[in-house]
Amino acid sequence: MIEPTHNQLSIKRQCELLGLPRSSYYREPITGIESDKNLYLMRLIDEEYTRHPFLGSRKLRNYLHRLGYRINRKCVQRLMRKMGIMSVAPRPNTSLKNKAHKIYPYLLRDVTIHKVNQVWCTDITYIRMNGGFVYLVAIMDWHSRKVLSWELSNTMDTSFCVSALERAIRLYGTPGIFNTDQGSQFTSELFTRVLKQHKIKISMDGKGRWMDNVFIERLWRSVKYEEVCLKDYSSVAELRRGLNHYFHYYNDERTHQSLDNLTPAEVYGETIKKVA
């Protein structure tokens, strides 16, 4: 994507053309914060969680025990928080909340999603790298499953989520409803302010709504099995190039059985044509 040695275009101009915040281009993976042992344990947890996202800290601890690693549940829970993962099974608390943030009502009960830009959704996942890790956020159109925008960050802050949201709006317009979990990044004033400015209705998963994240959870499984786990990325630049190619493949070439063997881009484009 970005060529640091380009003769005519500066990095700033290349970022502008790609709709990429220049600050995110320079982000590097987190290194040195976790020991090599913990990074390896996080890799094992990530692999098992990707295979079985319904597993919680107890089962993941037992899994590591069977592999010969003597680790207690408290440590597993800490690493899971670091990775931003939790069991998708029903539970009283569905996300890491910030009690100071406003929680919005769930708007999708008994709603049939039958067209694109009716509902968008988002989520964050952990992406392991050689010697570190980063976080990936994606904005998805619920009906077509098309990935509208994505961004990487070395911390689970709000700014890279806002960046992805603004880019999706810039490229595809606005949805009627934007649905998220109750994670602090999505309940923050910075994130919800963008939605309000564009008159987008805000919907947040509540108790018992864990299945609403299933589409984007499937996306994360595909990203990891079909891209990340097959390669050993050592830099954010390499990872960004790899994900750029993968999301193009996911949107434009990879057919989905649930979409009558069409691609997300085909479903999104055909629906837009019908509306026009």
Image (cartoon, helix red, strand yellow):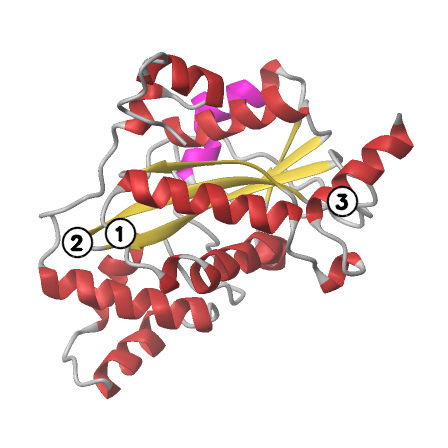
Quadrant containing the N terminus is: top left
Name which residue lies at 57% across and 54% down: 207
Name which residue lies at 73% across and 29% down: 176
Disc 2 packing (10 Å; few <14; some 14–19; many ≥20)? some
Q: Is residue 54 left or right of residue 39?
A: right
Identify the amino acid type marked 3: Glu
Residue 71's mark? none
User: In the rendered image, which residue does mark 1 sit on?
Assistant: 82
Secondary-structure class at tag 1: helix
Q: Is residue 186 magenta?
A: yes
Tell me how far mark 3 sits from mark 1, CA to CA.
37 Å
- Of the numbered discs 1 and 2, the one sitting upstream in the chain is 1
The main secondary structure of the magenta stretch is helix
- Of the numbered discs 3 and 1, the one sitting upstream in the chain is 1
Secondary-structure class at tag 2: loop
Tell me how far mark 1 sits from mark 2, CA to CA.
15 Å
> Closer to the camera, 169 or 235?
235
Where residue 237 sits: x, y (%)?
A: 30, 38
Name which residue lies at 30% across and 81% down: 63
User: In the rendered image, which residue does mark 2 sit on?
Assistant: 131
State the extent of the magenta-drawn residues as a range: 184-195
Identify the amino acid type marked 2: Gly
Where residue 112 sits: x, y (%)?
A: 82, 48
Residue 266's mark? 3
